[in-house]
Image: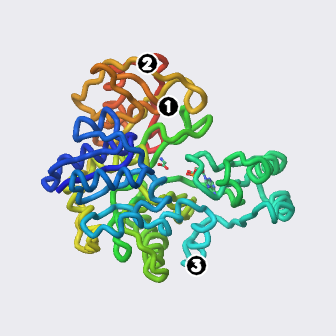
Amino acid sequence: MNILLIGKGGREHAFAWKISRSKLCDKLFIAPGNPGTAQFGNNLDIDPTDFAGIEKVCNDERIDLIVVGPEDPLVLGITDFFKKNENIKIIGPSAKGAQLEGSKSLAKEFMLRHNIPTASYKKFTKETYAEGRDYISEHSLPVVIKADGLAAGKGVVICNNHIEALAEFDLMINHYKFGEAGSTVVIEQFLTGIEMSVFVLTDGKNFTLLPEAKDYKKIGEGETGPNTGGMGAISPLPFFNADLKNKVIQKIIKPTVEGFVKEDLDYKGFIFFGLMITAENEPLLIEYNCRMGDPETEVVIPRINSDLVELLMATANGNVSDIIVDVNSQTAATIVAVSGGYPGIYKTGFRISGITENSSIVFHAGTEQKNSELFTAGGRVLAVTSFGDNAQTAVEASLQTLSHIQFEDIYYRKDIGFDLK
Ligand code: AMP
Ligand code: GLY
């Protein structure tokens, strides 16, 4: 079959790497892809939100399956758009399902309706601004202020004092700090514990668990400094034992999928559950994403031994209950090499050299190829994935590969997995 993969980051390189290994895959196209995905298929210069352009490719290239990487096309309704075409299967929820990521307040309301444990919260708009100020002023600290809509991963601010919290609230509501995404603001209780992510494939009725992961979001070692899109990830997690896994399934995943059935939500694709595990070993749901994580995909996908296209077709055909996912028990670590200055201002266009893949897989996140040479083209540039018997040996293998890779102002964390010893 012919497959079209949507997206252009490290996540999509990992998907392309895996999809191209499937016995079911004849031709793979990636829109728009990157120099990494080009090793496994044909990159097409089409924006992920250009549905008409994507439809034309589907007709020209007789596409059977579309796999959507990022959230934007899903929230904008790519799945609903292709529903009219019976010959094309698509992995990713309807726009209504994607609202679980696209609107934090709708996601919270869904969690409450289905008794899914989460932080307490209240939502406010311009009309209820004064009430919002009162709510914040009386809230315990730290307090979490969230823009309701998509804000490219930047819409969450954790405030340690009330003055800062009120200022953030004012910036979001009155000064459009995150544009329309912040016209509704969610004020939330601050949760403490260990963060981790759980991923499933669901056909909207049943689900199957994929390998779990933990990502390291801060720029600095020891999880310090500003948030980034992700500086590295590890899978599996030693503390995710049978007891915790069972609690996550019973209290979070099952009620979510049962909620889809009760609410008649069309959801065929990945669900990414962002969890906080409390000191009492109880899982709380921080957020839903309607897609896989990046860089989590760069450790989750390489650990899956099963044919990914078989899993995706079972999902699209409503047969998830038949799936058995065969997983490599070794630990995978990915370390993200970023441009100096990221997540603030950084330069691009630096030549990249020294990529060898002896004991690692080097996924491209923000690269560009010119005359067969590779250049930096984004904040996150490469994600280097390796296997080991534990997080430390896997990280050491990625660090070894990274020690040969050069571009001006390269930076990466050497302590990914530091807390998993
Ligand atoms: P998001 O942009 O929604 O992925 O959230 C970014 C990060 O903010 C999460 O991964 C958490 O680390 C943190 N966060 C969000 N909500 C809370 C909360 N209620 N308590 C503590 N940390 C939170
Ligand atoms: N790594 C977090 C995300 O993909 O949202």
> Furthest residue to the bottom?
262
Q: Where is residue 125 in the image (x, y as percent from the top left)?
A: 76, 62
Q: Quadrant of residue 271?
A: bottom left
Q: Residue at x 35, y 39 (%)?
A: 45
- First in sequence: mark 2 vs mark 3: 3
Q: Which residue is drawn at 58% across and 40% down?
A: 227
- First in sequence: mark 1 vs mark 3: 3
Q: Quadrant of the N terminus?
A: bottom left
Is 254 situated above or below 371?
A: below
Q: Is mark 2 on a helix, strand or loop?
A: loop
| Residue nearest the observer in this picture, 179 or 412 | 179
Report whether residue 238 is seen: no
In the image, the residue with mark 2 has its CB under 8 Å from the nearest atom of ligand 2: no
Q: Residue at x 30, y 57 (%)?
A: 66
Q: Quadrant of residue 384?
A: top left
Q: Residue at x 54, y 78 (%)?
A: 114
| Residue nearest the observer in this picture, 345 or 4 | 4
| Residue nearest the observer in this picture, 353 or 97 | 97
Residue under label 3: 113
Check disc 2 and give the amino acid type: Phe
Residue under label 1: 379
Residue under label 2: 350
Tally of marks = 3
Q: Position of residue 403 (x, y in %)?
A: 36, 21
Check disc 1 and give the amino acid type: Gly
| Residue nearest the observer in this picture, 122 or 237 | 122
Q: Are marks 2 and 1 in contact (CB under 8 Å)?
A: no
